[in-house]
Amino acid sequence: LSRQKPAACIKLYKNADKSKIEEIPDLEDFLTKRDYVGAITFLEFQKRIGKVFPDFELWIAYCLFHLGDYKKAYSMYNDILEHANCDANIVAYKACCCMYLGLYDEAHTLLNQAPESKLKSRLLFHLSHKFDEDHTMMMHMSNFKTVEDNCCYYSLNYMREKYDEAVSSYKHVLHLNKYLPANSRIMSNIFREFIALKVYIAMCYFKMEYYDVAQELLSDYMHFYPDSIAGTNLRACIYFRLYNGKTAETELESIQVTTPTCSDIINHNLVVVFRDGRGAQQALPPLIDVVYEARINYSLYLVKNDLPVFFLYYANILHLGEYADAYNLLKEFNPTHTKESVIKAVTLALLGQEEGNIEMINAAARCYEMIANSEATGTIVSRQCMSCACFLNKQFKKAIDCFNSVKGFLYNDDDFNFNYGQAKTACGAYKDAEQVFDLVQNEKLRNEYSFLSCLCHCYIMNKKPQLAWELYLKLETSADSFRLLQLIANDCYKMKEFLIAAKAFDVLEHADPNPDYWDGKRGAVVGLFQSIVLGMEPRKTLKELLVVLRNTSNPQVEYIARVITKWAKDNRV
């Protein structure tokens, strides 16, 4: 290149204020800021310029692991182990990758080859939990002495849904922290309060539905680490509970996805929770063996794909769903948490009702009862599950007692009101049932045959047959409308609401030439005529009665019509 003048004056650099020249960061600076992408870039740059950095491959694997790219980290540790005289502890690091990849058996095998260490003990403890080996866990607990060990033990309470105990344990660690020696590394500005523990406490409060408390605790952590993927995801979940899915989705947009693991979790939450299941059919199947909750949530989507997840506790709502597919997904699945057990119970109940399988319904009832007994007494979940068990066992009075205990919390919940109304109907409390049914706002639910039949039954029992008839007239002709018409005809006949009964039997007779419908219509006509004669019904109804009667070609019609007409003339009607 031909230059007119030098690119920069060397004297400027010589005379520059050295205090204003930024120092080149080293590896520790990147790790302190948790900038693992920057750390990898720094390491690769050092290698490119020919500087040999100690333990280069180990640091790359370390950064990949903390980025959540466990497959690459696993591959790196494999390569390192092929070197002669490598650190024996690397086997434990490789086992950590297996643990996060769900390869528990391989992780356990690797740890048998690793030397004794605190990391090995903690990892064996978590693996024992995965294998449900309580005796092995007790053995590992005896070696727990450090703060890290205790936190590992406390996490077991969280995994077993004992959130109160987990919160108490974590708060205990925070309280003990002030007694640590002043020269301890943990006493730095950020680590002095074990600030990461506040995220764990926030997660516990989130699970206990104390969303404001969880948000406040999380904000302390996010002040230091605003780019935390786990923290941002938790905050999005809190926003979803406090506000709506759109607000939560906006929060997730700030996350910079760096690994497939992060991408999988974020896509799972976006599809399943924040977008009410839209796109679940495409997004969830590939995640079934990747994200633990994906199998459960996809099963729930197949069962009931029009409601947000984690709110389904009632089993008698027959929405269109692929119950058999959901059952096949969960058939060999052993739930470890309450919500997983609830979803399995719901699937059993729905499929059992659809197929008329009593054994499956009884299994669902037993599952609900087991959940209720395993939960803390008096919680909303335990009462809801007990109400489901009573409902499926047709113990409706007991179910109503459970419903009454939680109705203050679920007053605007359509599913709750529907099931509560059904229980009231089964116990003969028709006025109360009608009021509860009126609270249901979901149009799809209100158009279900199970809802319409219950509401019509209540109308008729409450001496409002005209409302039941109007409800039928709004329906399009279908198998459900025919069944509803049969219910209206028979219920009105039993309650001596003969005019509506006659109309209903008349429509049934024209739709299906079954002689039973003519018998029902004839009985309703004669009953109505008797009520008019006795002064229990207005005489002006006679004209409508004759129109309905003569809408049949049966030879008995003329004889009955002559009797009615003669009486009308004699009484000047």
Image (cartoon, rainbow, N blue to C red):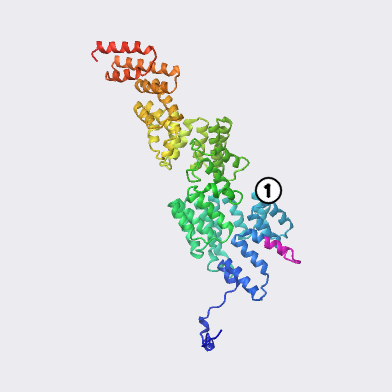
Foreground pick, 213 / 367 = 367
Residue kind at label 1, given as amino acid type: His
* Residue under the point 49% across and 48% down: 278
Q: In this view, does 435 lie to the left or right of 334?
A: left
Residue extending farthest to the front is 2
Q: In this view, does 501 lie to the left or right of 20?
A: left
Foreground pick, 46 / 559 = 559
Quadrant containing the N terminus in the rendered view: bottom right
Q: Where is residue 452 in the image (x, y as percent from the top left)?
A: 42, 32
Height in image: 101 above or below 19? above
Circle 1 sits in a helix, a strand or a loop, which is it?
helix
Mark 1: few/some/many CA within 10 Å (<14, 14-19, 20+): few
The image quadrant that residue 95 belongs to is bottom right
Q: In this view, does 213 lie to the left or right of 373?
A: left
Residue extending farthest to the bottom is 11
Quadrant containing the C terminus in the rendered view: top left
Q: What residue range appears in magenta?
A: 75-89
Residue extending farthest to the right is 84
The image quadrant that residue 371 belongs to is top right
Q: Where is residue 562 in the image (x, y as percent from the top left)?
A: 31, 11
The image quadrant that residue 342 belongs to is top right
* Residue under the point 64% across and 74% down: 48
Q: Position of residue 123 (x, y in %)?
A: 66, 56
The residue indicated by pointer 1 is 135
Q: Can residue 531 be seen in this view?
A: yes
Height in image: 411 above or below 225? above
Asked whether residue 108 is drawn in magenta, I would say no
Q: Where is residue 464 in the image (x, y as percent from the top left)?
A: 34, 27
